[in-house]
Image: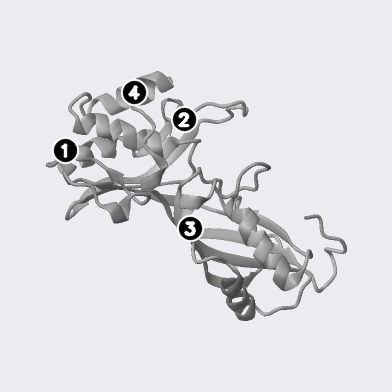
Amino acid sequence: MQLENASDNSYRNVKLTIAYDGSAFHGWQVQSNALSVQEVFQNALSKIIGDDHDVKGCSRTDTGVHANMYCIGLKTHHPIPPKRLQAALNNHLPSTIAVLNCEEMPLDFHPRYDCKRKQYIYKIWNNEVRNPFLNNYALHYRYVGMDEKLLNHAASYYIGTHDFTSFCTLDNRRPGDMSRTVFRSDVVRDGDFVIFTVEADGFLYNMVRIMTGTLLRVAQRKLSPEDIPVIISKHDRSFAGPTAPACGLYLNKVVY
């Protein structure tokens, strides 16, 4: 929402860190025909400070994707202290969204453009029997014995600065620069969970889910780890694996 008199001394910029269960939401950004996290957050905010606010998120997230850490920039003239705002929001928000922290920031802080890195994790439940409590929170891969060491080797080829066109779902948006720098990419096992972690300076549309789907092709021995750099070099989405379901994906950390 456009704010007036933004240059006066009462204008503030507040950073809020939230976590949310994305199962019931169509991503972060407000949509005209579906419920989003931003819509629910702004509705709760309006009950506390009225319409004197401008809200920006650190990233788009897909339908069904979760966030362990998501950062929001709030510009407002309202004088409510950060701790009171945090408590009030947690009182009005549904149980699927929680405000973890609230702090004053410089007026030029932007949650998206000032972000240096984002980290995502993808959870896979590797057990012959599905876990009903993980239905919306991990991908069930029933073929036991998934070789996490093989997948970790494959994931290492994502590290570095590459053109990730092969790992992006193209839509009607202008493609722009498809290069991203991946700082971390690894796979570990924790009991029946196999967890893929990837950290980069930015991500393309569906990039992590396609990276995961490609690793699943490696798990199925349909691809080898050494095929990953070849797929990257093709700059062609058709060479990579399928887009993994959203349920196992979490925005895990945002670094400023």
The answer for how far apart the CA atoms under marks 3 and 1 are is: 35 Å
Residue at 61% over, 71% down: 92
If you read the primary sequence from the N terminus, does the residue marked by circle 2 or circle 1 appear first? 1
Mark toward the viewer: 2 or 1: 1
> Image quadrant of residue 212?
top left
Q: From this viewpoint, which residue is outermost toward the left?
A: 145
- On residue 255, which mark appears? 3
- On residue 231, which mark appears? 4
Residue at 55% over, 31% down: 177
Q: Is mark 1 on a helix, strand or loop?
A: loop
If you read the primary sequence from the N terminus, does the residue marked by circle 3 or circle 4 appear first? 4
Q: Work out whether residue 225 or residue 96 is closer to the camera in this orientation and state it.
A: 96
- On residue 143, which mark appears? 1
- Residue 134 percent across, percent down from the top left: 31, 53
If you read the primary sequence from the N terminus, does the residue marked by circle 4 or circle 1 appear first? 1
At label 1, which amino acid type do we have?
Answer: Tyr
> Image quadrant of residue 128?
top left
The residue singled out by tag 2 in the image is: 168
- Residue 217 percent across, percent down from the top left: 25, 29
Mark toward the viewer: 2 or 4: 2
Q: In this view, does 2 lie above or below 177?
A: below
Residue 216 seen by the camera = yes
If you read the primary sequence from the N terminus, does the residue marked by circle 2 or circle 4 appear first? 2
Q: From this viewpoint, which residue is outermost toward the right?
A: 5
Quarter holding the N terminus? Answer: bottom right
The answer for how far apart the CA atoms under marks 2 and 1 are is: 27 Å
If you read the primary sequence from the N terminus, does the residue marked by circle 3 or circle 2 appear first? 2
At label 4, which amino acid type do we have?
Answer: Ile
